[in-house]
Image (cartoon, helix red, strand yellow):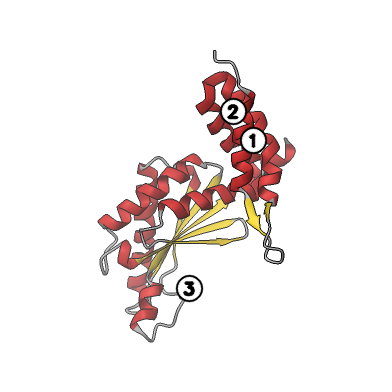
Amino acid sequence: MKMLKPLTVLATASALALAGCVTDPVTGQQRASKTAMYGLGGAAACGIIGALTHGGKGARNSALACGAIGAGVGGYMDYQEKQLRESLANTNVEVERNGNQIKLVMPESVTFATNSSTLNGNAIDALNKAAETLVKYHDTTLTVAGHTDNTGSDAINEPLSRRRAQSVADYLHQRGVAASRLSTVGYGSRQPVAGNDTWEGRAKNRRVEILINPDQNAVRAAQQG
């Protein structure tokens, strides 16, 4: 067993603090964000445990994981959002944040051919990258929602949107995301995000969204613990 070097924990904690710095819009000075401040103590403590059991690499990994937990639900989602933005940066998949929910928006142009529910190569690449983070942060639930434009009838659009959502969910499951975390829904053309009177608007409406939310059971357990 390797002896813990105090500088290992100090460096880990310092790195976390620096990563959590934000710039004050008024003064222009940098300060630690609330997320970083709340998670720092837990990160340092977990870093000690990790270093004792797995050496320096264990200190870093344990501190990062426990830092997210120590920061609470918001911090846990912050870490996921950051990793998802980095891994999906060149895929044309949009990453949106609303409170503690993260939304991945996959346009039809990077998911399916017209009137098809078979994932194309771009979609598979993006889902492979997303799954790496989704598997790691398992205290979340995922709702995969399919959407179409209003071209054609509901009899065609709604089943198509459901099949597309199911294709995405099935692939995420193949990549290690537990089936118990996944649910699907098809909205057809009922939830447009743009007008259906232009080609651009219809293209935006043809999409699959992955809604990532904190698992409420995990939240309750953390609050009780």
Q: Which residue is mark 3?
A: 191
Q: Amino acid at mark 3?
A: Gln
Q: Is label 3 in a helix, a strand or a loop?
A: loop
Q: Are marks 1 and 2 in contact (CB under 8 Å)?
A: no
Residue plotted at (34% across, 78% down): 153
Left or right: residue 16 compared with residue 195: right
Residue plotted at (36% across, 80% down): 200
Q: Is label 1 in a helix, a strand or a loop?
A: helix
Q: Earlier in the sequence, mark 3 or mark 2?
A: 2
Left or right: residue 88 compared with residue 224: left
Q: Nearer the viewer, residue 70 or 18?
A: 18
Q: Which residue is mark 1?
A: 43
Q: Which residue is mark 2?
A: 8
The crowd level at tag 2 (other Cα within 10 Å; few <14, some 14-19, many 20+) is some
Q: Earlier in the sequence, mark 1 or mark 2?
A: 2
Q: Position of residue 162 (x, y in %)?
A: 38, 61
Q: Earlier in the sequence, mark 1 or mark 3?
A: 1
> Which label sits in the foreground, 1 or 2?
2
Q: Amino acid at mark 2?
A: Thr
